[in-house]
Amino acid sequence: MKTIVGESKRYLDINLSDRSWTAFSPPEEDLRDYLGGKGLGLKLIYDRADSGARLAAMDPLGPDNILAFMMGTFVGTGATCSARFAGVTKAPLTGIMVGSSCGGPFGMACKTAGWDGILVRGAAEKPTTLLIDEEGARFEDAGDLWGLGTDEAQRRLVAKPRQGALVIGPAGENGVLYANIRSGNRYLGRGGMGAVMGAKRLKAIVATGQSFRIEPADKASFEKHRDIGRKYINRNAFVLGYRAYGTNYGVEPGIRAGFAPVRNFRDRTDERCRALSGEAMASRYKTRHAPCAPCSVLCGKKGTYPDGAERHIPEYETIGVWGGNILNFDPDLVGIWNDLMNDLGLDTISAGVTVSWAMEAAEKGLRPSGLAFGRTDNIAGILEEIALREGEGAELSLGSKRLAEKYGGMDFAAQVKGLEMAAYDPRAGWGQGLNYAVANRGGCHLNAYPIALEAMFGYIPPYTTLSKASWVAFLEDLFDAVNATQTCQFSIFGYLLEPPIARLTPKPLLKMAMTLLPGAAQLVLDWGALSGQVEAITGRRLSQRDYLKVGRRSHVLERHMNVLMGVGPADDTLPRRFLEEAATKHPDKSVVPLGPMVKAYYRKKGHDGNGVPTAKLLASLGIPAAGRKR
Ligand code: SF4
């Protein structure tokens, strides 16, 4: 087997329109400044779009749109939580940029085939499968795969253990605006990337890897930092909860702290949600680990259902939006619907929140529907209809924002910038409200995830505006550094909270510092075990502050691209429900005091008063005001 030291720097540029491909290397300064993953994907698309006007005019479902699949620094190195890669494109659901991180076998197969990333543009004349190996790309007809669910498509396409596939289901083929892309049992979930692939008539990409082994540039330093990082991850309370119960570990705190979505985000809590908790499912389904590999967190779970079927346990977000949010308290049903959505290729979050919006809209007489809170017998049928864009599903396939524009009910459409919010009611943590409002891709929980610090682990009080702008701005930068590296975001709290400086500080003192002096707290926090691995793999000098700057550059570039596509301050907001409706079932009566936090956030980030990255900020990060034509 041949060896790649750190990164191959080889990328594929695929044109489906004429079935051609070329290999290229990005400029060295882009590799240094963006590392890989999401940030580099954004930069490559930015340069190829060449101007803001072209970026704005680009039809997400047209041949000009570019779909980037980007490996990161960690993939293939044996670093913890490193079986991940990014997808980046202009999203059909929102009309702005979207980046997603995904586990499963594709990332490893692509990187060990010798390719650090793939750009896909154009559109094939007929259904096509793209085959990638160390020699390059080949194109195959996929007529016999078109129409298949993702389960069967993967079964037919992946013949060897060293292969990894990306596939879409009927939802992507039919242009559902929140169709996803699947790799193994993991997903590029948000924004409708599956529809972009479907519009290009690309059913699948299959990479055949293990032609190369990936070695760090400095093996001893890599192993030292990796082992320290692993130690931190292994003793972190957040990680231990996820390892024991999967992401559904969040259900119990959600009921207690009031971030559980209930009745289309009206109630904030319901004791009956307890039947869907990680603890309840561990006992009911005798759950066992089913992680991405390699991984030290081990959040993925599978279990045996009462019908005898072995199923992957749905994630917290799926449980939230298909459980209490539609008044369903039967975990078996969520497991069955989860399998169905995964096979059809639907983003479970957007599908669930669109359906709960339709239930409330019907209740209020805005739009007729057979969907109703607590009614479960017609859900499987409606999911099929959405994927095929038939019957009522044709409208539901457009997402909650477009439906609310047509029928009214925008106040209770739980979305931001067109992307449905995940299962965290922001009234339970005002930082989470700010996170949703300003997140680049819309109602995204993974933009900064402050709810973990606020309502899950109590490092910052949830009902205060103090420090929230600072933490959201800081965590956005750190998370986008992680997205460049492509390690799992779930490992972050281990890296951040378990080094001696945070671990040995008494929690009340740490909490006070994080709330009253967030800038000082961020200065003394230590994520060197993470940035040290990146430095050792690539051989580029990279302090932990340099690493944070990589994330900031990526985040600001994405904001800049979104501004060029028309995003403005009016988009950095929350649905009125979260700003004005305090009366819920939860005893804490709270609404999100958003305005002052957004202004403070703009200042922290270095944007002007309208949330536009200033010329000075762009220059300080080396971001050109327009893309460089490639
Ligand atoms: S923590 Fe979960 S999502 Fe992240 S890499 Fe591990 S198994 Fe995959």
Image (spheres, helix red, strand yellow):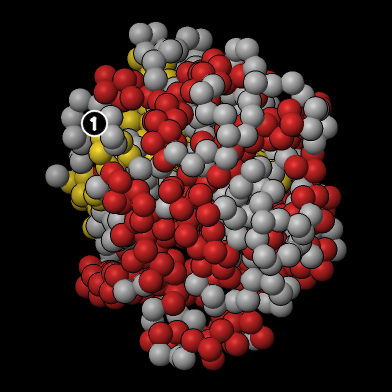
Residue 242, compared with residue 337, is above or below; it is below
Point out the image quarter for the C terminus: top right
Q: Residue 206 location in percent, x, y?
A: 32, 28
Q: Is residue 556 left or right of residue 597?
A: left
* Residue 113, picture quadrant: top left
* Residue 92, picture quadrant: top right
Within 10 Å of the Cα at label 1, are there few (<14), some (14-19), or many (20+) other Cα atoms?
A: few
Count of numbered badges drawn on the protein: 1
Q: Is residue 33 visible?
A: no
The residue that appears at 39% across and 8% down in the rendered structure is 143
Q: Residue 531 location in percent, x, y?
A: 41, 70
Quick one: SS at disc 1?
loop
Label 1 amino acid? Answer: Gly
Q: Is 540 in front, or is 243?
A: 243
Q: Is 190 in front, or is 197?
A: 190
Q: Is residue 274 visible?
A: yes
Q: Is residue 606 left or right of residue 183?
A: right
Residue underneath mark 1:
308
Q: Is 272 in front, or is 626?
A: 272
Q: Which residue occupies the extreme left position in the image?
A: 1
Q: Residue 385 location in percent, x, y?
A: 55, 17
Q: Residue 490 location in percent, x, y?
A: 42, 60
Can you tell me whether the CB of the residue at mark 1 lies under 8 Å from the nearest atom of ligand 1? no
The residue that appears at 69% across and 43% down in the rendered structure is 415
Point out the image quarter for the N terminus: top left
Q: Is residue 622 left or right of residue 449?
A: right
The residue that appears at 52% across and 28% down in the rendered structure is 376
Residue 26, compared with residue 346, is above or below; it is below
The residue that appears at 46% across and 53% down in the rendered structure is 274
